[in-house]
């Protein structure tokens, strides 16, 4: 009987708090954000290596595509939003998991940069109505 009354109490609290199924799901996903962040950082490091390899063999990144990067061993995850800016051999990439609570990370490679360093960046928070979409976008312009 105590278990039943405990379950009823939890249900009442959830209803009174205005939590609906979607909010509960987003809350649970937000708790997993640190796991998403580790995956995003690893993907970003792999992306940077693929970009450097492509630039080494092709001479620049002017014609790089997601398909070409897959040939170099990098593919985005199903829930990953990736934006890449390229100019010659230089690049900047921002990766973030589209699930709630996940952070965004970037790597920048300029002619004077040494090594690959991943940094957390602030990106505008997406509203619940328009979450970011997974996919890869490549811009061919200055960094």
Image (cartoon, helix red, strand yellow):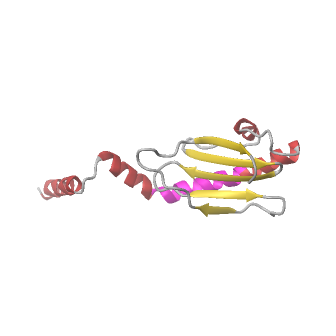
- Examine the image and state in which quarter residue 73 appears: top right
- Image side of residue 120 versus residue 60, left or right: left
Q: Residue at x 54, y 44 (%)?
A: 79
Q: Outermost residue, left direction? A: 1
Dominant secondary structure of the magenta stretch? helix
- Image side of residue 127 versus residue 42, left or right: left
Q: Outermost residue, top direction? A: 67
Q: Residue at x 79, y 38 (%)?
A: 63
Front residue of 11/20: it is 20
Q: Is residue 40 magenta?
A: yes
On-image quarter of the N terminus: bottom left
**x%, y% of residue 69?**
74, 41
Q: Is residue 58 magenta?
A: no
**x%, y% of residue 3?**
17, 56
Evaluate whether residue 112 shows in this view: yes
Evaluate whether residue 75 shows in this view: no
Front residue of 79/38: it is 79
For residue 118, above or below residue 76? below
Front residue of 10/128: it is 128
- Examine the image and state in which quarter residue 16 appears: bottom left
On-image quarter of the C terminus: bottom right
Q: Count of labels shown?
A: 0
Q: Residue at x 48, y 49 (%)?
A: 99
Q: Residue at x 54, y 50 (%)?
A: 97
**x%, y% of residue 54?**
81, 44
The stretch in magenta equals 32-47
- Image side of residue 105 versus residue 124, left or right: right
For residue 14, above or below residue 58? below
**x%, y% of residue 44?**
66, 53
């Amino acid at each position: 009987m105590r278990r039943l009354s405990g379950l009823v109490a939890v249900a009442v609290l959830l209803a009174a708090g205005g939590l609906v199924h979607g909010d509960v799901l987003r809350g649970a996903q937000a708790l997993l954000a640190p796991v998403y962040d580790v995956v995003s950082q690893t993907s970003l490091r792999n992306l940077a290596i693929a970009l450097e390899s492509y630039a080494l063999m092709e001479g620049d990144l002017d014609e790089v595509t997601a398909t070409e990067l897959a040939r170099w061993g990098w593919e985005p995850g199903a829930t990953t939003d990736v934006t890449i800016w390229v100019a010659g051999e230089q690049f900047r990439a921002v990766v973030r998991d589209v699930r709630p609570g996940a952070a965004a990370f970037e790597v920048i490679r300029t002619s004077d940069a040494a090594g690959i360093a991943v940094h957390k960046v602030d990106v505008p928070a997406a509203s619940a109505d328009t979450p970011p979409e997974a996919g890869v976008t490549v811009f061919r312009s200055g960094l």
